[in-house]
């Protein structure tokens, strides 16, 4: 297999620069404004399958601001699930978005560690233990589920499960296509310094 991108040495499909629809063009513009650059999946996935763009935007909107879960927990779940799925693109993106939202840097750093840190509250640990198990095996133990029920409502548990599944879906788009980190955390740091 030949290398198709210097930024992504394992990228399996070359990004397409041409935007096949107005919506994909608008997504590219929004990404450039919000993140500082257009993310690789736009050119690799959505340029080839633009009909995914609208439903994808709707689900991203739910994950970003349509859940009742605390926003820090949403960021932590996205990072942990992406870590379990070895998705460097999503780990970088979710961490950069969390940093942009001024999320707790200590907890964000701890989210990247294999073992759950004592810096997390008992409710956060229960939620993260649950999504760790679900991300690894597709299920959770009875003990983990019962610990989850102590701190979270049934509605919250469904939201956590959906968020874990949605993040896994995004990871499963990026990893097989060789889409690695786009350097969003570095871009965020550069913007913060200037």
Image (cartoon, grey):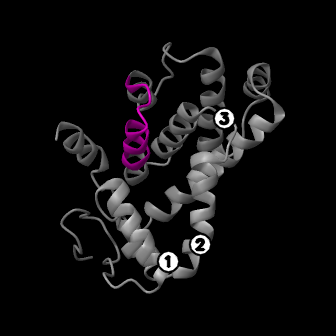
- Residue denoted by label 1: 23
Mark 1 or mark 3, which is nearer to you? 1
**Secondary structure beneath label 1:** helix
Q: Nearer the viewer, residue 103 or 117?
A: 103
Range of residues picked out in magenta: 92-105
The residue drawn where x is 58% and y is 16% is 121
Q: Position of residue 139 (x, y in %)?
A: 72, 41
Q: Residues within 10 Å of mark 1 (few under 14, many from 20)?
A: some
Q: Position of residue 12 (x, y in %)?
A: 34, 73
Q: Which quadrant of the rendered structure holds the N terminus?
A: bottom left
Q: Of callouts 1 and 3, which one flags the residue occurring earlier in the amino acid sequence?
A: 1
- Residue 45: image quadrant is bottom left
Residue that sits furthest to the top in the current view: 118
Dominant secondary structure of the magenta stretch?
helix
**36 horizontally vs 114: left or right:** left
How far is mark 2 from mark 1, CA to CA? 8 Å
Residue that sits furthest to the right in the current view: 154
Q: Nearer the viewer, residue 140 or 183?
A: 183
- Residue denoted by label 2: 54
- Residue denoted by label 3: 69
Q: Residues within 10 Å of mark 3 (few under 14, many from 20)?
A: some
**Secondary structure beneath label 3:** loop
Q: Nearer the viewer, residue 166 or 71?
A: 71
Query: Marks 2 and 3: in contact by CB < 8 Å?
Result: no
Q: Residues within 10 Å of mark 2 (few under 14, many from 20)?
A: few
Q: Nearer the viewer, residue 122 or 84?
A: 122
Question: Can residue 93 be found in the magenta stretch?
Answer: yes
The residue drawn where x is 29% and y is 65% is 10
Q: Is residue 109 above or below residue 99?
A: above
């Amino acid at each position: 297999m030949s290398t198709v991108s210097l930024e992504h040495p394992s990228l399996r499909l070359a990004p397409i620069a041409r935007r096949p629809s107005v919506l994909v063009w608008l997504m590219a513009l929004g990404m450039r404004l919000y993140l500082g650059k257009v993310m690789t999946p736009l050119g690799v996935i959505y340029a080839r399958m633009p009909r995914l763009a609208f439903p994808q935007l709707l689900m991203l909107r739910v994950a970003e601001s349509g859940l009742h879960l605390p926003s820090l927990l949403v960021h932590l779940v996205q990072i942990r699930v992406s870590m379990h799925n070895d998705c460097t693109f999503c780990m970088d993106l979710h961490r950069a978005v969390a940093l942009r939202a001024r999320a707790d840097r200590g907890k964000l750093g701890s989210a990247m560690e294999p073992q759950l840190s004592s810096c997390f509250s008992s409710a956060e640990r229960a939620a993260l233990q649950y999504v760790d198990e679900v991300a690894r095996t597709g299920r959770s133990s009875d003990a983990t589920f019962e610990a989850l029920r102590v701190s979270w409502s049934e509605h919250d548990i469904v939201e956590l499960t959906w968020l874990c599944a949605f993040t896994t879906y995004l990871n499963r788009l990026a990893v097989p296509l060789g889409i690695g980190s786009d350097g969003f955390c570095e871009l965020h740091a550069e913007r913060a310094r200037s």
